[in-house]
Image (tube, rainbow, N blue to C red):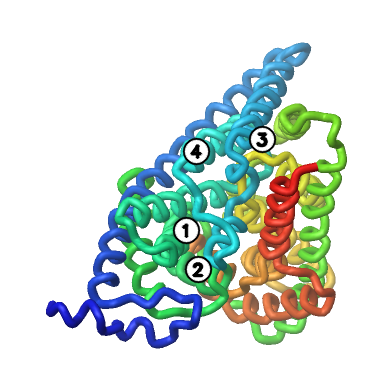
């Protein structure tokens, strides 16, 4: 490479706007190498986080099972442990405020230049806090929020260590956040869609190439810890729904779109309500929520957590009585926003996917009653479509949700219903002027930071 190459913009900057990073040939190679190295680190950290969560989930289930052998007082043990764990997670978030909640809204704010890149202290805060709230306490939160934010912090740290410009540090934190999502769900293509459909809101080829490298290295590294299988590996072959059922999926998309709007508003309402209870310390509020969620787990261990186990049972064809499924939907519909409002580390992607699967199962059962003669496969198809559709309504990233579900289940036969239903859900959310959840959370986060700086 000649010295002149340092002054000739690479073809990757052809779509650069005024605020975009213009990469020269040498800078591009530097960023690619940094993305590969940071991706490897993020893969180990994210893979380790997932592995620890799986171990803790197993231990929590064993403690709950043991508590049933001592019905008079045994329940006090898991409830007390969950309350203390949730309180400790909230205390960690008080020490590092960026560790609270999902973290994806902070990644988006950094990409827009509205916030500084996350410091390295986010990594231990997210790792330990996430294990306490998601794992030990079993709160209805997802692993993807902490994993995405930890990966973003690793990318930003790599850029700072290399003394890159601020715009290039933001670029690395953005593309590494995709690595975090890929590791969280073993979904590399979905992670690429996540970057461009959700974080940056536009496709830029140079970021695409850097993202591909970071995701490939990061996910490959995580496989050394977790193995390489779809998250929902027990999903059997699902027949493609007949074209005559598409009107049913149109109606389903409209209904789920409305549910998504309500869910978004419930999250924001719970956050506001918890802020209004200013006299009660945040640690105490989180501990109380952890204890309440633990009581639900005593009744049914699949009630809490991200919902991966429950969604896996649904997709594997496990039979549930319809009233039980409706109860699951009602409990998780309320418990998810309340858990998020506690301010402990944890995301909402996984709970949304689980809730979508349950909602789809309810719709499938009802459809079989109303329209006799439909195959049993249709209930699984509805569950798959429900996952992608509720995601589309709440997050407003329909292609990301669709690809995530396909990669997590290795099922492609319901793509057409997913597209139709997802489109209807987005239309409903748009007509009702419900903002995408992470846009709303980002605006709220920036407003609270501004108020904190202004003081009383």
Residue that carries the numbered disc 3 in the rendered image: 301
Residue at x 84%, y 35% (from the top left corner): 278
User: Residue 173 or 227: which is nearer the viewer?
Assistant: 173
Q: Is residue 51 left or right of residue 62?
A: left
User: Does any portion of residue 378 appear in the rendered image?
Assistant: no
- Give above or below for 73 relative to 206: above
Tell me the distance, in whole angstroms, between the alpha carbons under discs 2 and 1: 8 Å
User: Residue 46 or 65: which is nearer the viewer?
Assistant: 46
Residue that carries the numbered disc 4 in the rendered image: 127
Q: Are marks 2 and 4 in contact (CB under 8 Å)?
A: no
Q: Are marks 2 and 1 in contact (CB under 8 Å)?
A: yes
- Give above or below for 106 relative to 31: above
Helix, strand or loop for disc 1: helix
Helix, strand or loop for disc 4: helix
Tell me the distance, in whole angstroms, between the alpha carbons under discs 4 and 1: 15 Å
Residue at x 63%, y 43% (from the top left corner): 100
Measured as percent of width and height from the top left, residue 315 is found at 60, 57
Residue that carries the numbered disc 1 in the rendered image: 177
User: Residue 131 or 201: which is nearer the viewer?
Assistant: 201
Tell me the distance, in whole angstroms, between the alpha carbons under discs 4 and 3: 23 Å
Q: Quadrant of the C terminus?
A: top right
Of the image marks 1 and 3, the number of the one nearer the N terminus = 1
Q: Quadrant of the N terminus?
A: bottom left
Tell me the distance, in whole angstroms, between the alpha carbons under discs 2 and 3: 33 Å
Of the image marks 4 and 1, the number of the one nearer the N terminus = 4
Of the image marks 2 and 4, the number of the one nearer the N terminus = 4
Q: Are marks 1 and 3 in contact (CB under 8 Å)?
A: no
Of the image marks 2 and 1, the number of the one nearer the N terminus = 1
Residue that carries the numbered disc 2 in the rendered image: 195
Instruction: Quadrant for residue 280, please give it.
Output: top right
């Amino acid at each position: 490479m000649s010295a002149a190459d340092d002054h000739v913009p690479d073809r990757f900057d052809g779509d650069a706007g005024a605020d975009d990073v213009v990469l020269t040939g040498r800078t591009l190679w530097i960023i690619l190498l940094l993305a590969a190295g940071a991706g490897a680190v993020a893969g180990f950290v994210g893979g380790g986080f997932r592995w620890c969560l799986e171990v803790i989930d197993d231990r929590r289930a064993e403690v709950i099972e043991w508590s049933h052998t001592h019905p008079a007082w045994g329940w006090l043990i898991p409830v007390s442990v969950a309350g203390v764990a949730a309180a400790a997670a909230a205390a960690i978030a008080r020490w590092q405020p960026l560790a609270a909640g999902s973290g994806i809204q902070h990644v988006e704010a950094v990409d827009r230049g509205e916030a500084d890149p996350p410091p390295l202290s986010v990594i231990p805060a997210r790792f330990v806090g996430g294990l306490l709230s998601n794992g030990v306490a079993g709160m209805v939160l997802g692993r993807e929020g902490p994993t995405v934010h930890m990966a973003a912090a690793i990318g930003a740290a790599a850029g700072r260590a290399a003394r890159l410009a601020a715009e290039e540090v933001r670029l690395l934190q953005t593309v590494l956040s995709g690595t975090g999502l890929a590791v969280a769900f073993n979904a590399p293509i979905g992670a690429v869609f996540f970057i461009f459909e959700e974080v940056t809101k536009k496709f830029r080829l140079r970021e695409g190439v850097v993202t591909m490298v970071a995701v490939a290295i990061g996910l490959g590294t995580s496989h050394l810890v977790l193995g390489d299988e779809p998250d929902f590996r027990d999903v059997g072959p699902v027949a493609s729904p007949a074209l005559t059922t598409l009107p049913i999926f149109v109606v389903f998309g409209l209904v789920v779109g409305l549910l998504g709007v309500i869910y978004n508003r419930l999250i924001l309402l719970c956050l506001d309500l918890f802020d209004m209870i200013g006299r009660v310390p945040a640690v105490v509020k989180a501990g109380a929520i952890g204890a309440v969620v633990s009581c639900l787990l005593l009744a049914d261990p699949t009630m809490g957590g991200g919902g991966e186990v429950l969604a896996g049972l649904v997709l594997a064809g496990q039979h549930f009585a319809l009233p039980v499924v409706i109860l699951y939907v009602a409990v998780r519909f309320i418990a998810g926003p309340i858990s998020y409002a506690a301010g402990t580390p944890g995301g909402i992607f996984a709970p949304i996917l689980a809730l979508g699967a349950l909602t789809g199962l309810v719709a499938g059962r009802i459809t079989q009653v109303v329209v006799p003669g439909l195959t049993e496969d249709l209930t699984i198809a509805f569950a798959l479509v429900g996952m992608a559709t509720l995601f589309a309504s709440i997050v407003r990233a329909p292609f990301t949700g669709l690809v995530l579900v396909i990669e997590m289940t290795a099922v492609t036969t319901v793509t057409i219903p997913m597209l139709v239903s997802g489109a209807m859900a987005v239309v409903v959310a748009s007509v009702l002027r419900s903002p995408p959840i992470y846009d709303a959370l980002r605006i709220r986060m920036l407003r609270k930071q501004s108020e904190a700086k202004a003081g009383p």
